[in-house]
Image (cartoon, rainbow, N blue to C red):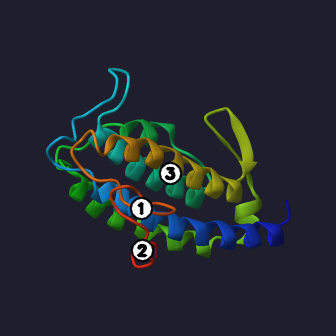
């Protein structure tokens, strides 16, 4: 991949991240304080743990892309919900400060940085720019899981790519 190609992909992928963050934020906001301990199976995370994983892991991804390397120890630390995070509202506050605020930092990376091939978890060796897409897919995957928890937690499912049974389609909520 050339640096020029990496910049084109960065701009496209970062724009997608910015739009997906708005949707993810609505799903995180829907996690209620009461009922957030719901888990569909003993192997599953609770609703709050899953909400935290989305926020923390995605900030970790951005940090790794910016640093040009991924810190496995820091990723493992992000799997534990901090004591001060007790509700979806707490996760949203953290998400806005630590994830949404970092997205713009990706636009500062040069084509040479973005084209650098980097390993993650000993499983992937991709140009850094491709991890932006990986991050986006990670967020969408776990957001889908969390949205399936919401009714069981006593909440409502917000519109995601269109209306839900709880929130009919509205252009005001989609942007």
Check the image and report above or below for 161 versus 131. below
Check the image and report above or below for 77 versus 56. above
Q: Count neighbours of disc 2 (C-alpha within 10 A) and say few if under 14, some if 14 to 19, many if 20 or more.
A: few
Q: Nearer the viewer, residue 160 or 25?
A: 160
Residue at left 28%, top 55%?
30
Q: Nearer the viewer, residue 146 or 78?
A: 146
Q: Earlier in the sequence, mark 3 or mark 1?
A: 3
Residue at left 62%, top 50%?
134
Query: Do the residues bearing badges 2 and 3 touch, measured as CB atoms within 8 Å?
Result: no
Query: Do the residues bearing badges 1 and 2 touch, measured as CB atoms within 8 Å?
Result: yes
Question: Which mark is in front, 2 or 3?
Answer: 2
Quadrant, the N terminus: bottom right
Q: Which mark is residue 139?
A: 3
Query: In whole angstroms, how far apart are the C-alphas of marks 2 and 3?
Result: 22 Å
Q: Earlier in the sequence, mark 2 or mark 3?
A: 3
Q: Earlier in the sequence, mark 1 or mark 2?
A: 1
Q: Which mark is residue 159?
A: 1
Marker count (numbered): 3
Query: In whole angstroms, how far apart are the C-alphas of marks 1 and 2?
Result: 8 Å
Q: Position of residue 107 (x, y in %)?
A: 60, 74
At mark 2, the secondary structure is loop
Residue furthest to the right in view is 2
In the image, taking residue 20 as reference, residue 81 lies left or right, namely: left
Q: Which residue is the site of mark 2?
A: 170
Q: Nearer the viewer, residue 152 or 166?
A: 166
Q: Position of residue 130 (x, y in %)?
A: 70, 55
Q: Count neighbours of disc 3 (C-alpha within 10 A) and say few if under 14, some if 14 to 19, many if 20 or more.
A: many
Q: Position of residue 2 (x, y in %)?
A: 85, 65
Residue at left 39%, top 65%?
168
Q: Position of residue 92 (x, y in %)?
A: 29, 60
Check the image and report above or below for 153 versus 170. above
């Amino acid at each position: 991949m050339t640096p020029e190609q990496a910049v084109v992909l960065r701009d496209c992928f970062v724009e997608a991240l910015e739009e997906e963050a708005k949707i993810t934020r609505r799903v995180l906001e829907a996690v209620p304080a009461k009922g957030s301990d719901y888990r569909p199976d003993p192997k599953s995370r609770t609703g709050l743990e899953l909400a935290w994983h989305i926020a923390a892991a995605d900030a970790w991804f951005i940090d790794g892309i910016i640093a040009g390397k991924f810190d496995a120890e820091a990723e493992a630390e992000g799997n534990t919900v901090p004591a001060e995070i007790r509700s979806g509202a707490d996760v949203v506050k953290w998400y806005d400060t630590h994830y949404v605020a970092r997205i713009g930092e990706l636009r500062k990376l040069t084509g040479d940085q973005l084209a650098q091939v980097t390993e993650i978890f000993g499983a992937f060796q991709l140009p850094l720019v491709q991890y932006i897409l990986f991050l986006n897919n990670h967020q969408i995957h776990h957001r889908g899981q969390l949205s399936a928890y919401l009714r069981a937690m006593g909440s409502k499912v917000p519109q995601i790519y269109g209306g839900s049974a709880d929130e009919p389609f509205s252009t005001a909520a989609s942007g």
